[in-house]
Image: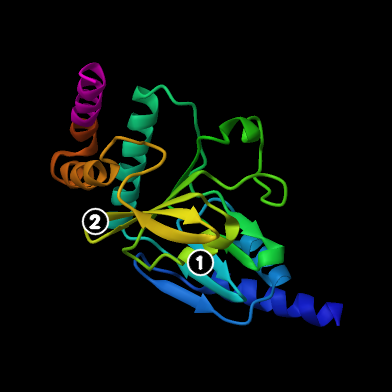
Amino acid sequence: MGSIRLAIAFMVTLQLRQIKISPGQVIELEDIDWPEFEAILTELGDRRSTRVAYNNRTLTVVAPLFAHENSKISLGDVVKVLLEELEADYVAAGSTTLKREDLSKGAEPDDSFYIANFSKILNKERINLDVDPPPDLVIEVDLTSKTQTDIYEALGVPELWCYDEGRLRIDVLQNGLYVQVSESPTFPGWPAAVLAQKYVAQAKGLGQGKAIRELRRWVRGRIQNA
């Protein structure tokens, strides 16, 4: 039985390696068990442009578009500028694979940050959600594919930012489910959603260098006038 399972896993990873996924494409594979999922992650490796999500035996592989990557970088810039100017400590976790076998769920977010729990993952080479906390804030851009929010709910991510068609939705975890809020609990008193929407648009029109300088000046001015 073990040899059959290994053969199946090898067949699946071989097929993935042979498939060319163009930007904007999404591939779904059903009836993938956890050992096969782990084997696929190993086969794909860390140096790749694709991202994966695993949800109750369904594996989704996504190749993001340039516009998707541009937006997620800009949203990450907003978070970093706010954290730095507010002198908050953090660890950027990027698209680190977040997974738990007992929940049969895994995901690679567009961006993620440890803020309240940053000290708990200092000096770590890998994140293991069996013992480590999930990121405090996760960013997802719904352009190439829709975010599977139930994965992040199950993994216990406290705050989720979803950017879709120029609008940012902020959800926070309450009693195990996401609830949309008007203000980010990470940045109380700051119009994070409006700020993010404005900055992403500016970054596309002005370039991220100029846009981030203007964003930083605005944030510093607001802090000084508080």
As rendered, which of 70 and 149 lies closer to the eye?
Answer: 149
Screen quadrant of the C terminus: top left
Question: Circle 1 is placed at which residue position?
Answer: 150
Please tell me which residue is depicted at 53% across the width and 64% down the height of the picture: 151
Mark 1 touches mark 2? (CB < 8 Å): no
Question: Circle 2 is placed at which residue position?
Answer: 167
Magenta portion: prevailing SS class: helix
Percent position of residue 138, x then y:
45, 49
**Does residue 210 lie above or below 50 as drawn?**
above
Percent position of residue 1, x then y:
86, 83
Range drawn in magenta: 213-226
**Does residue 206 lie above or below 10 as drawn?**
above
**Does residue 117 lie above or below 21 as drawn?**
above
> Position of 82 compared to 158: left or right?
left
Q: What SS does tag 1 mark?
A: helix
> Position of 152 compared to 191: left or right?
right
As rendered, which of 125 and 14 lies closer to the eye?
Answer: 125
